[in-house]
Image (tube, grey):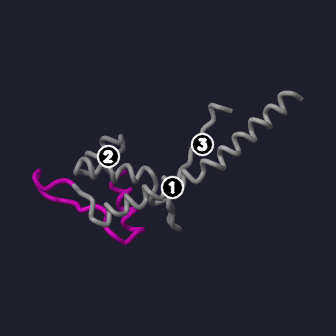
């Protein structure tokens, strides 16, 4: 089946539920690019309150701040990644990419076996 692809969603969870996945990674990368949680949320098409909860859940589970928030007037508003946040998104991105690559061969094997199975079924 040439038009079949594998889609994998990886996330980290605790007993409280999911706290890290590709959406949080994208959000943190956008914060890094935009310098603001509000702008990052807007660019991703999610509400600021959802983005805030995503970051808050991550920080609570890890026990470490990933964002440095600048509070106060227009000049001091915004956010940036902490040093830990920078290192963490690199670590997580590498992890999720490596996991997906590891699935290439099993999926290729599955796909070939499925093609054979389908051919056999269609001949019957």
Residue lying at 13% horizontally and 58% vertically, measured from the top left: 72
Image quarter in which the C terminus is found: top right
Q: Earlier in the sequence, mark 1 or mark 3?
A: 3
Q: Single out the mark in the foreground, 1 or 3.
A: 1
Q: Which residue is mark 3?
A: 6
Q: Which residue is mark 1?
A: 98
Q: Position of residue 100 (x, y in %)?
A: 54, 51
Residue at the far right in the pictured view: 124
Measured in 3D between alpha carbons, the distance from the residue under mark 1 to the one under mark 3, in whole angstroms, is: 15 Å
Outermost residue, bottom side:
63
Look at 37% across and 72% down and name the residue there. 63
CA distance for labels 2 and 3: 28 Å
What are the residue bounds of the magenta stretch? 50-78
Residue 107 lies within the magenta run: no
Q: Disc 2 or 3, which lies upstream in sequence?
A: 3
Q: Say how many tags the image has.
A: 3
What mark, if any, has residue 82 been given in the picture? none
Residue 58 image position (x, y, % from top left): 39, 62
Question: What x and y, as percent, mark residue 61?
Answer: 42, 68
Residue at x-position 46% and y-position 54%: 21
In the rendered image, the quadrant that contains the N terminus is top right
The residue at which mark 2 appears reads as 41
Secondary element at tag 1? helix
Q: Earlier in the sequence, mark 2 or mark 1?
A: 2
SS for dot 3:
loop
**Would you place residue 11 above or below residue 123 in this image?**
below
From what the image shows, is residue 90 above or below residue 39?
Answer: below
Instruction: Please say if 19 is above or below 33.
Output: below
Classed neighbour count for the residue bearing mark 1: other residues with Cα under 10 Å, few (<14), some (14–19), many (≥20): few
| C-alpha separation, residue under disc 2 versus residue under disc 1 | 27 Å
Q: Secondary structure at mark 2?
A: helix
């Amino acid at each position: 089946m040439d038009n079949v692809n594998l889609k994998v969603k990886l996330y980290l969870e605790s007993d409280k539920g999911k706290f890290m996945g590709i959406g949080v990674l994208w959000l943190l990368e956008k914060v890094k690019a935009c310098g603001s949680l509000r702008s990052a949320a807007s660019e991703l098409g999610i509400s600021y309150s959802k983005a805030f909860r995503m970051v808050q859940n991550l920080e609570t589970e890890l026990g470490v701040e990933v964002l440095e928030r600048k509070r106060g007037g227009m000049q001091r508003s915004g956010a940036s990644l902490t040093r830990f946040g920078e290192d963490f998104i690199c670590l997580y991105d590498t992890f999720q990419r490596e996991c997906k690559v590891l699935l290439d061969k099993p999926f290729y094997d599955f796909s070939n076996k499925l093609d054979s199975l389908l051919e056999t079924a269609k001949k019957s």
